[in-house]
Image: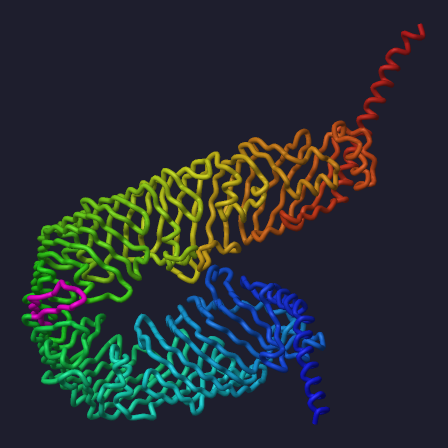
């Protein structure tokens, strides 16, 4: 027994020794291979700390575990600045035998702790996760993985406390999952894999087409998925999903890729249903219901929820779908409140049997609920979303004070009697000028809203409004606001009026009072929006839209004033924010005059005046433009914050900005200093014109880089996936080094500037496409330039260093230039420079050729050297290169091909060209020698007779 214990202890000691030695021995080897593989195979910026990488044999014995404390993957163009993945801890399980054999490392598992994942798909289908550099293969359908250092044989993976965001702008759809915990298993290397997926998320939000379908719901999913990875078919079976408290089952399949009709299509064949008929589970999805008090709610009733999705989804079509939701005998009551919501009945079907979304049918056959003694009854049928056949009958009678006895409202007080009656039947078709026959009335008497959190009440609310149409024609529709009154924090506001004839809006509106936006948004919060300030207004207007369009202002009696104080707005449409300390506006029939405005736009203070015209048609007709002119003055403008969707980011990443096509606006700007990136622009003056979805820059002048600039240009984002730009610039006496540091096009078109100190002038015109990060697509650039180097010194230039090595002409170093003129063309990704001469001391270098915008060189350098000053070393170099002695020529010519890059140039002696030039020099010298000898002979013959006598 003692011997057995000794043997076991020895084996354990050996295993522990191996577990200590093996990771220590292989760590550096694996880290090096990992770094090489990431550099060679991944088109992204990957950051981790090699010194923090550790190996363990115990964590996933008998496999090795590679661990590091952090990892981030950041995209490149067009996803510059977008972080695909960042994680606080990262683990990979590696097959031990693959490490010992020295062959490819087999990765068996992946584990992420607190990852932040952003999956982004652009409108043109490009995705930020497509970062793998496939090795070229003779078979285009098959990537060659034989040269990779790793093979993926993953059979398990895990996410702890993750944040996952999916942003698909091609649909458009966004999904956000917070506090995600996920465990998955199954062989991802098999052609057919049975995957087991368990996922929990504390909050899931789903937005599709601008509508939020799920908001902060809890997700718990236990799914089994058969993945046919070769055919791209994914089959769901016996899956259990719970959203808040509602259980769901999902069955069927999704096919992508080659098994679907087109590579970009997805084929759905899915069914879903809720296996539990408890009404309380459905109630958990109602906004505001699912809280810590939800479990105490007393609820009864039955539910049937099911549906199908079947067909093809792509940019042209959608799958057919069906949703059924039926509630019978529903009831719920909060235990600490006096009344219950009872007799709840709902019968809803949403269906589409075609592949076009506009054929959707929404059929709410029954809606019944008694909110205490407040009944709601209704039914609605909408057939089609473009040409809609509508039948509706809705009634509700509510005592708002009694609602606080039904729902917990956190110290909010409501009062007032509300009535809603709506009957409608007919067709809505804007093109055919049809509108349903409708009779609707909404009324609120003696209403008030007060919250203990915000002491300013909204009180004395009285509203009476109606919607009527007797004929079914749009022209006979009328909206009446017989009365709208309220007091907000003691400030009265009242309005009344009417709008009729929806084919040619005819209106008569009066509004007067003060709106305290701060108090209003405290009582009625606007999610994602900050709005505060005071508006004092007195407005009277009446007329017809056709008169406004035709500018018959005598038919539009309009007058009024509006004073705005301390307005503070920040929202999705203006994330940088706007603060109006004060503004004064005056309404006229044809204009809205901005008499004075002063405030803060983003972080830039400004003053402004101007006018808006065509504002009445713009408000009443979505196809009418808003026109105007604004004169803006600012001491400083930070342009960077307007180039990003996230102005709070420490380093703003530019993104494509859409220009509304119904805004025709001119801004005359005078700015003391504007800052773009890190480039200051001083004394900026010029005009910005926004029209037809295009931004035009006209005669914008400024001082920068030590010189003067005059620019014109256009920015055209009509195709948001491929926005275009064009501009021309006239630069006078600017600093070369600063231009290279701040101007992207200077780096691309004239990278030699990085070695120059001096000044230049230029006229430059270029056009092309922009990437989604607002950087130019280099291969799309077309343009031309005339560049004058006023005066400059070229130092530490690798090209000149290679020339000195080849020719031994040391005076080529530190070349001095003055009044050097270059003509440049940009086309198809190449910069072509027409031949020009550079004089360096007494040496002449003729330069011609081209380079790609990535920096690949293809030039010819022709040297013309004075032999008398070149020295012995040049003579030896010349003879070594040409195989010819330098002879006694006054000047020597020698040609080189310049290839490689600016930092690593390659010089190749052009023997054929130089030999021809040497031959020409020799022949010329021979002719000169013969000519000289002939002259001497003639002189001798001329003297001979005199000598003989």
Q: Is residue 157 above or below residue 935?
A: below
Residue at far right of view: 948
Q: Can you say whether 660 is above or below 340 in the image?
A: above
Figure check: 613 above or below 36: above
Looking at the image, how many numbered discs can be counted on the residues? 0
Q: Does the magenta stretch include residue 931?
A: no
Q: Residue at x 45, y 58 (%)?
A: 773
Q: Quadrant of the N terminus?
A: bottom right
Dividing the picture into quarters, in which one does residue 610 lie? Answer: top left
Whole-percent x, y for residue 889 in the image = 78, 29
Q: What stretch is highlighted in magenta?
A: 447-467
- Colouring scheme applied when the structure was drawn: rainbow
* Magenta part, dominant SS: strand
Q: Is residue 767 above or below residue 282?
A: above
Q: Is residue 138 visible?
A: no
Quadrant hosting residue 518: bottom left
Specify whether residue 686 is in view: yes
Residue drawn at 55 percent across, 44 percent down = 750
Q: In this view, does 381 lie to the left or right of 661?
A: left
Return the residue nearer the eye: 45 or 404.
404
- In terms of image quadrants, where is residue 400? bottom left
Please state if 252 lies on the left or on the right of 779 as rendered: left
Q: Where in the figure is residue 801, as x and y percent of width and height?
A: 69, 41
Q: State the residue in front, 41 or 381.
A: 41
Q: Quadrant of the C terminus?
A: top right
Q: Does the magenta stretch include residue 462?
A: yes
Residue 563: % across, % down: 15, 50
Residue sitting farthest toward the bottom: 1
């Amino acid at each position: 027994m003692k011997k057995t214990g000794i043997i076991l202890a020895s084996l354990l000691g050996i295993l522990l020794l191996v577990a200590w030695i093996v990771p220590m021995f292989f760590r550096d080897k694996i880290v090096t291979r990992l770094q090489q593989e990431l550099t060679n195979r991944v088109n992204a910026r990957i950051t981790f700390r090699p010194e923090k990488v550790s190996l363990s044999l115990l964590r996933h014995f008998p496999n090795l575990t590679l661990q590091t404390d952090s990892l981030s993957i950041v995209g490149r163009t067009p996803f510059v600045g977008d972080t695909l993945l960042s994680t606080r801890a990262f683990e990979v399980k590696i097959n031990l035998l693959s490490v010992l054999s020295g062959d490819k490392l087999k990765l068996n598992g992946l584990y992420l702790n607190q990852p932040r994942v952003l999956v982004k798909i652009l409108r043109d289908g490009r995705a930020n996760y497509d970062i793998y550099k496939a090795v070229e293969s003779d078979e285009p359908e098959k990537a060659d993985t034989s040269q990779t250092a790793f093979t993926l044989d993953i059979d398990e993976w895990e996410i702890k406390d993750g944040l996952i965001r999916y942003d698909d702008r091609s649909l458009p759809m966004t999904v956000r999952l917070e506090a995600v915990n996920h465990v998955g298993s199954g062989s991802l290397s098999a052609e057919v894999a049975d995957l087991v997926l368990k996922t929990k998320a504390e909050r899931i939000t789903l937005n599709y087409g601008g509508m939020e379908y799920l908001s902060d719901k809890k997700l718990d999913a236990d799914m089994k998925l058969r993945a046919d990875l070769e055919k791209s078919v994914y089959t769901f079976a016996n899956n259990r999903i719970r959203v808040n408290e509602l259980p769901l089952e999902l069955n069927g399949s999704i096919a992508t890729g080659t098994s679907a009709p087109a590579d970009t299509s997805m084929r759905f064949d899915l069914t879903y249903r809720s296996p539990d008929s408890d009404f309380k589970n459905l109630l958990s999805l109602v906004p505001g219901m699912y809280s810590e008090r939800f479990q105490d709610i007393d609820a009864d009733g039955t539910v049937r929820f099911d549906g199908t999705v079947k067909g093809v989804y792509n940019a042209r079509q959608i799958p057919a779908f069906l949703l059924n939701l039926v509630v019978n005998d529903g009831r719920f009551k909060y235990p600490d409140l006096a009344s219950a919501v009872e007799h709840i009945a709902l019968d809803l079907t949403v269906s589409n049997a075609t592949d076009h979304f506009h054929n959707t049918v929404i059929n709410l056959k029954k809606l019944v609920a008694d909110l205490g003694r407040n009944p709601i009854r209704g039914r609605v049928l909408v057939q089609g979303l473009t040409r809609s056949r509508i039948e509706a009958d809705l009634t509700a009678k509510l005592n708002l004070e009694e609602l606080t006895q039904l729902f917990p409202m956190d110290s909010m007080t409501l009062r007032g009697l509300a009535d809603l009656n709506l009957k409608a039947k007919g067709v809505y078709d804007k093109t055919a000028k049809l509108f349903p026959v409708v009779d609707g009335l909404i009324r609120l008497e003696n209403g008030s809203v007060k919250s203990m959190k915000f002491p300013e009440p909204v009180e004395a609310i009285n509203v009476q409004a109606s919607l009527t149409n007797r004929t079914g024609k749009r022209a006979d529709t009328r909206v009446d606001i017989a009365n709208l009154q309220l007091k907000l924090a003691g400030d009265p506001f009242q309005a009344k009026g009417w709008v009729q004839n929806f084919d040619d809006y005819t209106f008569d509106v009066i509004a007067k009072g003060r709106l305290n936006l701060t108090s209003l948004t405290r009582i009625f919060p606007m999610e994602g929006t900050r709005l505060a300030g005071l508006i004092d207004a007195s407005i009277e207007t009446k007329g017809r839209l056709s008169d406004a369009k035709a500018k018959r202002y005598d038919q539009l009696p309009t007058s009024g004033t509006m004073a705005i104080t301390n307005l503070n707005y920040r929202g999705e449409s203006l994330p940088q924010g706007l603060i109006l300390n004060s503004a004064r506006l005056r309404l006229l029939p044809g204009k809205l005059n901005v008499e004075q405005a002063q405030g803060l736009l983003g972080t830039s203070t400004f003053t402004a005046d101007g006018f808006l015209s065509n504002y009445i048609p713009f408000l009443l007709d979505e196809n009418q433009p808003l026109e105007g002119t604004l004169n803006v003055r600012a001491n400083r403008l930070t342009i960077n914050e307007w180039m990003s969707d996230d102005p709070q980011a420490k380093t703003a990443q530019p993104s494509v900005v859409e220009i509304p096509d119904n805004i025709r606006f001119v801004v005359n700007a005078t700015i003391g200093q504007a800052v773009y990136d890190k480039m200051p622009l001083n004394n900026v003056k010029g005009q910005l014109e926004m029209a037809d979805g295009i931004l035009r820059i006209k005669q914008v002048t400024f001082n920068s880089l030590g010189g003067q600039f005059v620019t014109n240009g256009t920015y055209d984002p009509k195709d948001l996936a491929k926005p275009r730009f064009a501009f021309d610039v006239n630069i006078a006496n600017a600093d070369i080094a600063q231009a290279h540091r701040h101007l992207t096009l200077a780096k691309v078109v004239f990278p030699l500037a990085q070695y120059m100190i001096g000044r230049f002038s230029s006229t430059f015109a270029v056009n092309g496409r922009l990437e989604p990060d607002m950087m130019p697509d280099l291969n799309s650039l077309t343009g031309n330039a005339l560049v004058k180097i006023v005066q400059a010194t070229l130092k530490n230039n690798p090209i000149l260093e290679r020339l000195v090595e080849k020719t031994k002409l040391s005076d080529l170093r530190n070349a001095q230039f003055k009044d050097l003129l270059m003509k440049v063309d940009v086309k198809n990704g190449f910069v072509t420079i027409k031949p020009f001469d550079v004089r360096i001391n007494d040496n002449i270098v003729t330069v011609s050729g081209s380079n790609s915008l990535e920096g690949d060189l293809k030039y010819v350098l022709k040297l013309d050297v004075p032999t008398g000053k070149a020295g012995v070393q040049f003579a030896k170099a010349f003879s070594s290169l040409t195989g010819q002695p330098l002879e006694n020529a006054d000047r020597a010519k020698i040609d080189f091909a310049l290839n490689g890059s600016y930092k690593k140039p390659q010089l190749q002696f052009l023997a054929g060209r130089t030999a021809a030039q040497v031959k020409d020099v020799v022949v010329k010298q021979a002719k000169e020698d013969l000519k000289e000898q002939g002259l001497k002979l003639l002189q001798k013959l001329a003297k001979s007779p005199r000598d003989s006598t």
